[in-house]
Image (spheres, rainbow, N blue to C red):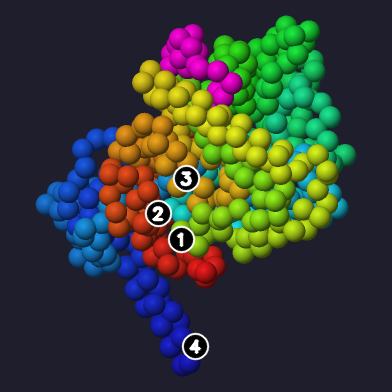
Amino acid sequence: MTRTLIALTATSLMALTTATAQTTALTGATVLDGTGGPAIEGGTVIVEDGRLACVGAAEACPVPEGATVTDVSGHFITPGLVDAHVHFGQTGWLDGRPDSGVLGDVYAYDETIASAKAHPERWHEAYLCTGITAVYDVGGQAWTVTGEHATDTDRPDRVHVRAAGPLTTHVENNAGFMTGAVADEALFLPMQENADIAGNIAFLQEIGAHAMKVWYLAPSDEDRERLDALMMAAGAAADDAGLPLIVHATSLREAKIALQAGAEMLVHSVDDAPVDAEFLRLLTENDVVYAPTLQAGRNWARALASVAVDSPAPIDDPNNCVDADIRARINDTGSLNANLPPRLDFGWAINRLENAGAEVLQMQQNLVAVHEAGGLIATATDAGNPMTLHGPSIYEEMELMEAAGIDPAEIITLSTRNGAIAMGLEGETGTIEAGKIADLIVLAEDPRESTSAFRSLTHVMRLGVLTPQSALQVHDGE
Ligand SMILES: [Zn+2]
């Protein structure tokens, strides 16, 4: 008797949940669908089984009976944000970068990595809390590709993840990074001869990487010919293997070699010179994604300066999304300052900040040149680098793009659809169109007026599940 009753109750509860969970409607908002097309005023968005069933004017999308309706009149709906350049293996602080030269014995790199590997959900939480619903991890140890955080993402508490895995590079002696004797722990894979490239591709395919990333720093004059040839060989081999080639090449000459080698994405700006006609032609002819990462270098300078002067850098976290442990580390500049090598003094920090400022200006000029040439730009932060925080750093990135002269209305598309294109997910997410996965955000302010409107996030919908932003915050405000 009791058993039957319980069974019945369970069944009817399940029926109830199914009916309400399956169809959701958002009504009354201005819908900016991410395609760059006209806004839908007073629009209705209907979601069924995690997918967008109807997007349009109220008359065009009648709300089905039994649907859960949320009236968001006066608000603005855009696709979920996409950060096209992050690293799950980095924390947003210096503890993830042994090459910074300031860690001393304070933070052991293997412990940082072990913690990042054990708790990748921290970054998923920070992203959703910020309004980000997809990220491209463009470099990390093999676990950043094979980890369940990256492979099991069809769920509302995780963002979409694509991951490139270990970086192929000619650079040797990456002190402090190559901690593992086994390939599984390596951050870098060698690029000294053609056989290396074949081996790297086999490894990337074995772990299921979504791309081959080459870290191509400007070679010395005597090494140029040999390394350019290797870069070209890497491109050809990646193409044969069906792996998209993505390249870190921030100097104009090397960026052009990367484009000639068939790169599908440049993961940073060119920052050493104005881009030229040849660069723009190579970039636009092949629809290569250009990911500006305008703030990461300056944030490095901020982080190092905060240690040099022992005064914590301000944390730009308007929606309370930054992991508490990381906040504590950023605010504890004293322990790193106590171990600081003598040459890294106040003057050094100021100099670094000044150089970083000049670099941002060069990158902004190049961004405008790429934009005017019709290049495919995807908003990207390099989150995980010191002071480039997983999640909220995307707000500042968009604001720097706007400050460069890009229209805020266009930045919506660069920060949604174009990121999905970079990740190869444009058929599934990145715009608000019927048939796509229901990944969207609700804002109180109009992002066509100013990109700072993304800070006024009120709701996040991931895979059809609508959550108020207040329920996604990871710590109490101060
Ligand atoms: Zn990066």
Q: What element does badge 4 sit on?
A: helix
Compare residues 459 and 465 and report the one nearer the observer: 459
The disc labelled 1 sits on which kind of residue?
Asn
**Mark 3 is on which residue type?**
Glu
As drawn, the label of residue 455 is 2
Residue 167 in sight here: yes
Q: Verify CB contact (< 8 Å) between mark 3 and mark 4.
A: no
278 over 244 or under it: above or below: above
Q: Residue at x 22, y 50 (%)?
A: 30
Residue 10: x and y in percent read 43, 79
Q: Earlier in the sequence, mark 2 or mark 1?
A: 1
**Residue segment shown in magenta:** 269-286
Nearest to viewer (mark 3 / mark 4): 3
Q: Earlier in the sequence, mark 1 or mark 3?
A: 1
Q: Is residue 101 magenta?
A: no
**Relative to 325, residue 212 above or below:** above
Residue at numbered disc 1:
319
Q: x, y (%) of residue 154?
A: 50, 52
Q: Provide the secondary structure element on which disc 3 rests.
A: helix
**Residue 119 visible to the viewer:** no
Tell me whether the residue at label 2 lies in contact with that at label 1, contact meaning CB atoms closer than 8 angstroms. yes
Q: CA distance from mark 4 to mark 2?
A: 50 Å
Q: Are marks 4 and 2 in contact (CB under 8 Å)?
A: no
SS at mark 1?
A: loop
Tell me the crowding category of disc 3: few under 14, some 14 to 19, or many 20 or more residues within 10 angstroms, Cα based.
some
Q: Which residue is mark 4?
A: 3
Name of the residue lying farthest toward the front:
347
Q: Which mark is residue 396?
A: 3
* Label 2 secondary element: helix
In this view, 312 is above or below 202: below
